[in-house]
Every structure is written in structure tokens, then in C-alpha cells.
Image (cartoon, grey):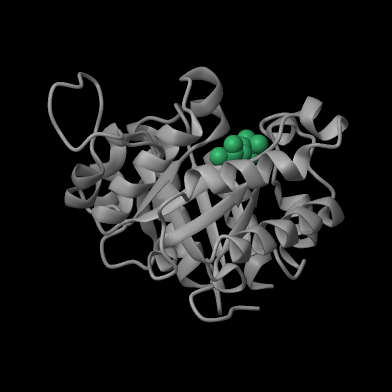
């Protein structure tokens, strides 16, 4: 299923959850299980930034990558409470999540802000995991694809085909996040295909880029989603906080 830079990825977004205790319990267990996988996915752990150092220490010499859940659109300066993409790189991250629907909804992130962040992330030599997805209302009114295409166009404004090697797309229907309602594998596949077509339309190598699915991915639905031809793995919220569940999801990619 991989083609060029397209690769299977399972990313853990802890959101604002976790503790030092969780790091000490969960990360070594995930590390051990992932190292035993044949042909396993690239695993990425994105804890709250305060725990990055502890997670990194647990992952020394492992193949698992680390990332942050957000960075500022600015380079540096008087932006109390923010962290810069360059700092994420300096702290040893490889990935940055950007444009998550919670950031768009709760923190007012527009497509323009997302695009500015993408540009900072790429300039810092990191991989941008760009989230897109429609609300239930938008899906019910038949606008899901148009919304996702608009978000892609906005977030990737100014990204060149060469830079696309450092972009991963995560399709997360908002109505499926944390609700236990997941898109059917068929609906997710259809949207992933539409995303690739849109990327190609934007002059980017859409068929060679990784496109992940997120939204209530659990051990019991992961394999059906991941076996679809255009789904390259998942962005996992709730289930990434339980070692057993997250490991089972990583195993579903390699099976
Ligand atoms: O970033 C992760 C997603 O928002 C999915 O969260 P969830 O797996 O809890 O539905």
C-alpha cells in the first residue's frame, strides 16, 4: 500500500490528558509491543508538551516518534503561553498536529492561521499532521466533501510539491471525535479518495501522501478502516490513553 513517501502511521493524540504516571506506565509498554511488530506502522506519540521530555526519555533508541499537538503561527516573542515550531524541533519532535477541529472550534483557528502554522512547521524541518473534517450538520446537508476540500486548500496554501513530503493529512469527521460513532470504512474510504484527488488538484502528490483517519478508532474497528486502500493509518484520541487499546490499534496496521 505504500508508494513513495506514503507510509502507514498510527499517531496518539493525548489531548489534555495524562500525567507523569501515565507516561511511566504506558510508553514503555507501547515501545515494547511496537518493537515486536513485523512491518509495523510509524508510531507517533503526542502528549501534552510538558511531558515531552519524559516521553522522549522513555523512547530513546526506539523507532517511535514524538510530536506536539499545536504550535504558534509566530516565530518567537511576546506570545505568553505559546510554543514555537522551532522549539518543538529543538525539543526532539518530528511531528506537529495542526488544525485539529478542537483548535478550530474552541480556539477560533481559521484556515489562514492553520496555513501560517503549517508554514512555520515546514520551515522548522518538522512533519505537519494537518487535520480536516466536517461537522454533522455539514455532512447532513451534503457539504462534507466541499468543506474538507476548502480546508485542504486553505491549510496548504503556499505548500509546494517538494514540501508535501513533510505533510500528513488526518481526516477526522467532527461528529466522530470522542463520540464512539465512527465513519463507516466505506464512507471514510470515499472521503480519503476525494482528499487525494483534491491534493492532486492543488498540484501536490496526493497519491504518495499519507492520509490518516481519526474519530473513535478502537481496537474493534481499526482493522476494517486500515484495510481500505486509501486509509494509511489513524489519529487516535481516547484509545491512545490505554496501552492495551493503542497497541491493538498499532497491531491492526501490521496485520
Ligand atoms: O486527535 C484525535 C481525534 O480527535 C480522535 O479522538 P477520539 O479517538 O477520542 O475520537
Q: Position of residue 82 (x, y in %)?
A: 25, 26
Image quadrant where one finds the C terminus: bottom right
Taking depth in this image into account, of 250 and 211 the one nearest to the observer is: 211
| Image position of 243 with respect to 105: above or below | below
Q: Position of residue 228 (x, y in %)?
A: 77, 66
User: In this view of the protein, can residue 242 be seen by the observer?
Assistant: no
| Whether residue 7 is situated above or below residue 3 in the rendered picture | above
The relative height of residue 84 versus residue 205 in the rendered view (above or below) is: above
Give the residue at x 47% y 50%: 156
Using residue 212 as the reference point, say whether residue 175 is left or right of it: right
The residue depicted at 76 percent of the width and 58 percent of the height is: 225
* Quarter of image, res 69: top left
Q: Residue at x 24, y 52 (%)?
A: 57
Quadrant housing residue 223? bottom right
Q: Quadrant of ligand 1?
A: top right
Q: Position of residue 88 (x, y in %)?
A: 25, 45
Quadrant that contains the N terminus = bottom right
Which of the 4 image quadrants contains residue 211?
Answer: bottom right
Where is residue 120? Give x, y as percent. Answer: 28, 46
Say whether residue 213 is left or right of residue 93. Answer: right
Q: Nearer the viewer, residue 59 or 10?
A: 10
Q: Residue at x 42, y 42 (%)?
A: 115
Does residue 148 appear in the picture of this structure? yes
Q: Is 181 situated left or right of 128 in this image?
A: right
Check the image and report above or below for 131 versus 102: below
Amino acid at each position: 500500500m505504500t508508494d513513495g513517501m506514503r507510509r502507514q502511521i498510527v499517531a496518539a493524540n493525548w489531548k489534555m490528558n495524562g500525567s507523569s504516571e501515565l507516561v511511566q506506565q504506558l510508553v514503555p509498554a507501547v515501545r515494547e509491543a511496537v518493537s515486536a511488530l513485523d512491518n509495523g506502522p510509524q508510531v507517533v506519540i503526542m502528549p501534552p508538551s510538558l511531558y515531552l521530555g519524559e516521553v522522549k526519555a522513555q523512547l530513546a533508541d526506539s523507532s517511535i516518534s514524538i510530536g506536539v499537538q499545536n504550535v504558534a503561527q509566530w516565530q518567537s516573542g511576546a506570545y505568553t503561553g505559546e510554543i514555537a515550531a522551532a522549539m518543538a524541533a529543538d525539543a526532539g519532535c518530528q511531528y506537529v498536529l495542526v488544525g485539529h477541529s478542537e483548535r478550530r472550534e474552541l480556539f477560533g483557528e481559521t484556515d489562514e492561521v492553520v496555513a501560517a502554522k503549517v508554514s512555520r512547521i515546514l520551515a522548522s524541518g518538522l512533519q505537519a499532521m494537518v487535520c480536516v473534517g466536517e461537522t454533522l450538520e455539514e455532512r447532513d446537508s451534503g457539504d462534507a466533501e466541499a468543506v474538507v476540500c476548502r480546508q485542504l486548500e486553505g491549510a496548504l496554501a503556499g505548500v509546494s510539491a517538494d514540501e508535501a513530503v513533510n505533510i500528513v493529512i488526518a481526516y477526522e469527521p467532527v461528529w466522530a471525535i470522542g463520540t464512539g460513532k465512527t465513519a463507516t470504512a466505506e464512507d471514510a474510504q470515499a472521503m480519503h479518495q476525494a482528499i487525494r484527488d483534491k491534493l492532486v488538484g492543488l498540484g501536490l502528490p496526493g497519491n504518495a501522501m499519507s492520509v490518516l483517519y481519526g474519530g473513535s478508532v478502537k481496537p474493534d474497528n481499526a482493522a476494517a478502516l486500515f484495510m481500505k486502500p486509501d486509509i494509511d493509518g489513524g489519529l487516535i484520541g481516547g484509545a491512545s490513553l490505554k496501552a492495551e487499546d493503542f497497541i491493538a490499534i498499532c497491531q491492526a496496521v501490521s496485520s
